[in-house]
Image (cartoon, rainbow, N blue to C red):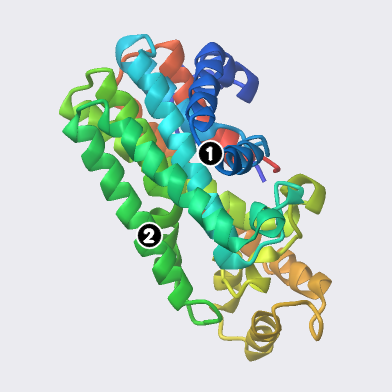
């Protein structure tokens, strides 16, 4: 399904993901060096697990947002922008560590998860080390606005995780409740990436708010597409089994839409999978068929597209530039991605 974002064509020529990342390719290389430099100062075990996690792949969307936002405001990525892009990647890596432990995940990005390879006790401590190192790096900037943004983001992310845990196995979750979790667990980090990139570049308060709104909408769109891909992609592309969320007892938007009409047969099927934490009594293929046939995947994609359009509107206060064009293209890249 193609999602058309509401941006005037005269102002906006979409860039490909390759073109977007090429604008900050050298910056991202410096971010990788900064990340590795901090790992080098750690103990052998922390360094080994940290590098294993960091080398597992990922699109580096979050640090790229920091860098693009910085360049949008002042035309360059300063050493502070590089360090804070590394901070955001470090915080993101820490959240993945903790998520895998909580979810008892065995695979992450197509490889054995760190918690399986090293055990929960060691891995959770490495996650804590990543969090504290990221905040130590942030503190060196001596900028209260940055610390305010990061502490607020981290608190909201933890709140979101706790809220989601309280709803595991619950088949009566509403769309609003799910979107609240999405904002807390995913979108506020995207928001902080864009906002912090602006702060270090000297953005005005109005520009900081616009970047924060942009990142929040991008983050919601990103996670809603993840909800869809959990049903339509392949294990090879996802790096984990298809339909993992429901097997972990979590309802996402396509299933929330499916259950809205009150069909008790559908609810029994979904509740059975959530209770068994497996596709034993209910076949995976039957669940996948329902979300396709009932149009709930299409509806979830459309909702992701709506948030993507909100993101583009937030950048209207900035003058045209290659970095604005890239940031306008990110929501399209997100809603059209297949992995």
Q: Which residue is mark 2?
A: 158
Position of the C terminus, as image quadrant, is top right
Q: Residue 197 in the image: x percent, y percent?
A: 34, 26
Front in this rendered view, residue 219 or 147: 147
Measured along the vertical axis of the image, is residue 184 above or below residue 310?
Answer: below
Front in this rendered view, residue 15 or 243: 243
From the image, state whether disc 2 or disc 1 is nearer to you.
Answer: 1
Q: Which mark is residue 138?
A: none
111 sits to left or right of 328: right
Q: Residue 322 in the image: x percent, y percent?
A: 46, 12
Can residue 274 be seen at all in this image of the molecule?
yes
Q: Which residue is mark 1?
A: 43
Decide: marks 2, 1 in contact (CB < 8 A)? no
241 sits to left or right of 304: right
Can residue 215 be seen at all in this image of the molecule?
no
Instruction: Locate residue 317: give its quadrant.
Output: top left
As helix, strand or loop, the secondary structure at mark 1 comes to loop
Badge 1: residue crowd in 10 Å (few <14, some 14–19, many ≥20): few
Instruction: Locate residue 196: give its quadrant.
Output: top left
Residue at figure coordinates x 24%, y 30% from the top left:
208
Q: Residue 56 in the image: x percent, y percent?
A: 68, 39
239 sits to left or right of 16: right
Q: Sequence order check: which comes first, mark 2 or mark 1?
A: 1
Residue at figure coordinates x 75%, y 77% from the top left:
278
Q: Residue 118 in the image: x percent, y percent?
A: 67, 55
Front in this rendered view, residue 210 or 129: 129
As helix, strand or loop, the secondary structure at mark 2 comes to helix
Residue at figure coordinates x 52%, y 27% from the top left:
329
Measured along the vertical axis of the image, is residue 169 above or below residue 84?
Answer: below
Residue at figure coordinates x 58%, y 14% from the top left:
22
Real-space CA distance between mark 2 and mark 1, rounded to the nearest whole angstrom: 26 Å
């Amino acid at each position: 399904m193609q999602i058309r974002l509401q941006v005037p064509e005269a102002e906006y020529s979409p860039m490909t993901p390759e073109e977007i990342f090429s604008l900050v390719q050298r910056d991202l290389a410096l971010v990788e060096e900064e990340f590795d430099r901090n790992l080098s100062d750690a103990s052998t075990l922390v360094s080994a697990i940290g590098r294993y996690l960091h080398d597992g792949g990922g699109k580096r969307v979050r640090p790229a947002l920091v860098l693009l936002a910085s360049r949008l405001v002042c035309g360059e990525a300063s050493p502070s922008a590089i360090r804070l892009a590394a901070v955001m990647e470090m915080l993101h890596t820490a959240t993945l560590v903790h998520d895998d432990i909580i979810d008892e995940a065995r695979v992450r990005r197509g490889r054995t998860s760190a918690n399986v390879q090293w055990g929960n006790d060691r891995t959770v401590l490495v996650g804590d080390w990543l969090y504290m190192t990221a905040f130590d790096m942030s503190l060196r900037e001596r900028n209260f606005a940055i610390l305010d943004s990061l502490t607020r983001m981290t608190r909201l992310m933890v709140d979101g995780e706790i809220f989601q845990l309280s709803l595991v196995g619950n088949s009566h979750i509403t769309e609003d409740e799910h979107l609240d979790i999405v904002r807390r667990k995913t979108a506020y980090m995207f928001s902080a990436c864009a906002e912090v990139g602006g702060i270090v570049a000297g953005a005005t308060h109005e520009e900081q708010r616009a970047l924060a709104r942009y990142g929040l909408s991008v983050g919601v769109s990103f996670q809603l597409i993840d909800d869809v891909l959990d049903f339509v992609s392949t294990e090879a592309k996802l790096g984990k089994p298809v339909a993992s969320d429901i097997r972990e007892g979590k309802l996402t938007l396509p299933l929330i839409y499916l259950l809205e009409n009150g069909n008790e047969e559908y609810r029994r099927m979904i509740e059975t999978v959530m209770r068994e934490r497996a596709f034993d009594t209910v076949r995976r293929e039957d669940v996948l068929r329902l979300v396709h046939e009932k149009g709930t995947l299409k509806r979830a994609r459309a909702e992701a597209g709506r948030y993507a359009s909100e993101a583009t509107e937030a950048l209207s206060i900035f003058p045209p530039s290659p970095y604005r064009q890239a940031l306008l293209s990110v929501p399209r890249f997100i809603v059209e991605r297949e992995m």
